[in-house]
Image (cartoon, helix red, strand yellow):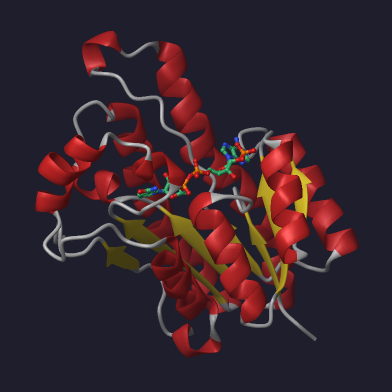
């Protein structure tokens, strides 16, 4: 029987590429999203992947969401924590709301989803937890103290949980993408992109969402069974840990 993969924020951007890539690789895939119904509907129509709406920032909603996915698709073997937001501001202007929203989705959301999927993975003695962190969690980014803190937190979470999951057959890994050509990044002014961003990337181009999806596919596979607590850095050479 096909393994079941649940991708949070799986209806657009990097998450959509991950969900599609996993479906092509033979997984039964569920995609979660927060509120953009039009995008979710269009994604489901195009791919046949069912979309489920709840906020990863809400623990009870995550619990109910996983039950719904398990009822409709099957027990979650592979969890991709991809949902993420930005609320950028220089620190002296950052509001507590901007801080808490980003921590709530990008860090607590990862706790919420993983905590709800974990008991099932433990009882079945198999699991894959893959979290999409960011280059900015590795190096820090001005204007993103909230985002950098959350994404760095995801890496600490991954390393700690890898040690707990190992004996239960669960691997826990992270991916740190650099600039990926999603709608958000492609919307950046062309001059800023060409003069300021691309020169920072040694390979001279943005990454593609499918390039992140291929990292996920590898970490989810049986071939990656000995890899846990690891971070794959996919940033075109922009930053080395
Ligand atoms: P997008 O903004 O394109 O998509 C975000 C997705 O997350 C959407 O499906 C959105 O749902 C969902 N989402 C947002 N908040 C929640 C929530 N509270 N609960 C459930 N789903 C939620 O993001 P990207 O594809 O650009 O980024 C994906 C991940 O990759 C993020 O974690 C991001 O931080 C990380 N990343 C991105 C990089 C880039 O260059 N793009 C670089 C490095 C890391 P809805 O459609 O309903 O709003």
Residue 53 image offset from top left, x and y in percent: 75, 41
Q: Which residue lies furthest to the right in this view?
A: 71
| Residue at the spot 71% in from the left edge and 78% down from the top edge | 3
Residue 110 image offset from top left, x and y in percent: 54, 46
| Residue at the spot 48% in from the left edge and 85% down from the top edge | 225
Front-most of 202 and 150? 202
Horizontal arrangement in the rendering, residue 227 relative to residue 152 (left or right): right
Front-most of 199 and 225? 199
Count of marks overlaid on the render: 0
Horizontal arrangement in the rendering, residue 32 relative to residue 225 (left or right): right
Residue 20 image offset from top left, x and y in percent: 61, 68
Front-most of 131 and 160? 131
Front-most of 169 and 105? 105
Choose top left, top right, bottom left or bottom right for residue 168: bottom right
Horizontal arrangement in the rendering, residue 236 relative to residue 48 (left or right): left
Look at the picture and state if 80 lies above or below 3. above
């Amino acid at each position: 029987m096909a393994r079941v993969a649940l991708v949070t924020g799986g209806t657009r951007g990097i998450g959509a590429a991950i969900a599609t890539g996993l479906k092509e690789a033979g997984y039964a895939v569920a995609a979660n999203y927060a509120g953009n119904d039009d995008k979710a509907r269009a994604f489901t129509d195009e791919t046949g992947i069912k979309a489920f709406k709840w906020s990863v920032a809400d623990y009870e909603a995550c619990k109910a969401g996983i039950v719904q996915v398990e009822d409709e698709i099957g027990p979650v073997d592979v969890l991709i924590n991809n949902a993420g937001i930005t609320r950028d501001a220089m620190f002296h202007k950052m509001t507590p709301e901007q801080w808490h929203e980003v921590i709530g989705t990008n860090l607590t959301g990862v706790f919420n989803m993983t905590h709800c999927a974990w008991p099932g993975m433990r009882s079945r003695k198999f699991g894959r937890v893959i979290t999409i962190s960011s280059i900015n969690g590795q190096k820090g980014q001005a204007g993103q103290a909230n985002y950098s803190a959350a994404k760095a937190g995801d890496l600490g979470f991954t390393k700690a949980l890898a040690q707990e999951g190992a004996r239960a057959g669960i691997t826990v890994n992270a991916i740190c993408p650099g600039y990926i050509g999603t709608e958000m990044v492609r919307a950046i002014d062309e001059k800023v992109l060409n003069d300021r961003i691309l020169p920072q990337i040694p390979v001279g181009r943005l990454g593609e969402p499918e390039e992140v999806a291929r990292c996920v596919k590898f970490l989810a596979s049986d071939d990656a069974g000995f890899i846990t607590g690891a971070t794959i850095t996919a940033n075109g050479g922009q930053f080395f840990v």
